[in-house]
Amino acid sequence: MPPPAPPPSAGAAAYRRRPAPPDARPPAPQPKSTTSLAYKAPPPKASVQKSKAKAPTRNADGDWCFADEPGFRPNLAPYEVLQMGSFGGTYFRPIESHVTQSKFKSSEVLTEYPKEWWAPMGKANMKRMLATTAYDQTVNTYGVKCGGDLYMWESSGWINAIDPYGAFQWYCRFFLGRRCSDDARQISRFNKCMGPTGRWRSTLCGKINNANTAFDSRNVSPVIRQTLQHWGYRLTEKHYVAHCKKKGLTPQLVGRGAVSSSSSYEEDSD
């Protein structure tokens, strides 16, 4: 397993930006009165396959490779996303799902995942980083808030009953080998955000080029960087240069490495 990420940092002050894409938005406590929920579209039905897929491997570029889904290449594992500081610490908080008509407890949900995922956080920080009921942007890597709430996800028809917490829960389970009939939809959504032509990855590259600064500068679009992290991705120099080449731009690499230690987490390939 790759080395753990450094502890999260308060980072920069919060910025106001365009809303993040569906499910990149961290869950927040639902309104007290949500007994009736009007869906814009019904959640898609899904079934789980009996057999599990092989564990992903990491290539020399740091991308996670899934043998059965070669077009899906996140470069952060679920445990890395959470160890780095994400979702304001709320993702696996207790929820009441209107899709399943069930309540879920953090203590029960977290037992599904390897204990090694949470060990680097330490017991004292687990609740703060995984299951706090109040969104805390200081938990996040970039110290900013991005996202909506579970009620919005559900009412928009984005939540599948097999993954009541949302897309990141789907990613955790996919990473561990579960395969289901909802995989194609979720992979498409991930790639539209953080894939080679994904909206947020492309937008970040453009902003970096316009700012004439390094690809890893924390001063450029911390909200987009945090959003991409929630979707299992962090921009690399190679990906930035490839984007510029495709767009006929000159990569701006000045000041490379001039970032705080909390954002300089690097992974070696396995």
Image (cartoon, rainbow, N blue to C red):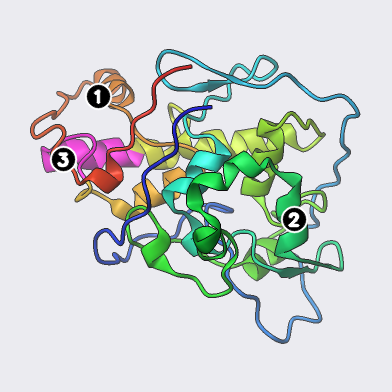
Pointer 1 and pointer 2: residues touching (CB < 8 Å)?
Answer: no
Q: Which residues are magenta?
A: 203-217
User: In the depicted view, which residue is nearer to us: 30 or 16?
Assistant: 30
How far apart marks 2 and 3 lie (CA) works out to: 43 Å
Answer few, some or many: residues within 10 Å of disc 3's Cα (few below 14, many 20 plus, some between 14 and 19).
few
The image quadrant that residue 117 belongs to is top right
Measured as percent of width and height from the top left, residue 151 is found at: 67, 70
Secondary structure, mark 1, is helix
Label 2 is placed on what type of residue?
Val
Label 1 is placed on what type of residue?
Cys
For the point 64% across and 39% down, which residue is it?
Answer: 171
Residue 40: in sight, yes or no?
A: no
Look at mark 3 in the image and give the residue it sits on. 210
Of pointers 3 and 1, the one earlier in the residue sequence: 3
Q: Quadrant of the N terminus?
A: top right
Look at mark 2 in the image and give the residue it sits on. 109
Of pointers 1 and 2, the one earlier in the residue sequence: 2
Q: Nearer the viewer, mark 2 or mark 3?
A: 2
How far apart marks 1 and 2 lie (CA) works out to: 42 Å
For the point 69% across and 54% down, which residue is it?
Answer: 158
Label 3 is placed on what type of residue?
Asn
Answer few, some or many: residues within 10 Å of disc 2's Cα (few below 14, many 20 plus, some between 14 and 19).
few
Look at mark 1 in the image and give the residue it sits on. 244
Pointer 3 and pointer 1: residues touching (CB < 8 Å)?
Answer: no
Outermost residue, front direction? 123
